[in-house]
Image: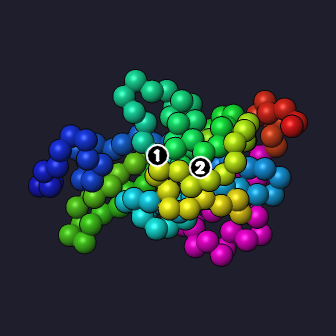
Amino acid sequence: MTAHVDAGSRQFPPRPIVAVGAVIIDGDRVVLVKRGREPLKGEWSLPGGAVEIGETLGAAVVREVREETCLDIAVGPVIEVLDRIRPDVAGRIEYHYVIVDYLCRVRGGTAACGSDAEAVQWVERTDLTRYSITAGVAAVIEKAFGASPYSFGFQAK
């Protein structure tokens, strides 16, 4: 039996929620956000969120990044597709996301805390362990750093 929640809630969803994430890289730095709401409230992660009805994946990445970081980005290729399934203490599925992470670069703006984040930070690759990111997020970031920007159609700045 699942908990009854309104149709707009992301908690205890009747089916997985499609979401996007942005691995925004500049040299040896990546953008991290401190989550402003559940799931992972207060934890550092990649910017991103749920895709809205009628929205393309690319448009969702651009919107979510703007909302959380105030940055304007160019969206590159998919880096990873993964599940984030989080049960509650009783074992019921409290959150279930299917996340499509994209390699991105900044086109404009200055990183600043937006409406959906407690904080935003450019983080040096060598400093990532200081931010207690999940192993999954770390793996996606490393995969993005290992990808050549030229193989994805990005041009030099």
Q: Which residue is mark 2?
A: 69
Q: Nearer the viewer, residue 49 or 118?
A: 118
Can you give x and y, in whole percent of width and height, for residue 13 in the image? 26, 47
The type of residue carrying mark 2 is: Thr
Q: Which residues are drawn in magenta? A: 124-147
The 10 Å Cα crowd at callout 2, few under 14, some 14 to 19, many 20 or more, is: many
The type of residue carrying mark 1 is Gly
| In the image, residue 143 lies in the stretch drawn in magenta | yes
Residue under label 1, please give it: 49
Of the numbered discs in the image, which one, if any, rests on residue 21? none
On whether residue 54 falls in the magenta region, the answer is: no
Give me the C-alpha separation between circle 2 and circle 1. 12 Å
> Which residue appears farthest toward the right when viewing the image?
156
43 is higher (above) or lower (below) than 20: below
Q: Are marks 2 and 1 in contact (CB under 8 Å)?
A: no
Q: Is residue 22 left or right of residue 152?
A: left
Residue at 42% x, 64% y is: 41
- Residue located 43% across and 55% down the image: 84
Q: How many marks?
A: 2
Which scheme is used to colour this image of the protein? rainbow
Left or right: 39, with 61 as reference point: left
Between 42 and 135, the residue placed more toward the observer is 42
Figure quadrant of residue 7: top left
Q: Residue at 72% across / 38% down in the picture? A: 108
> How would you classify the magenta stretch by its main secondary structure?
helix
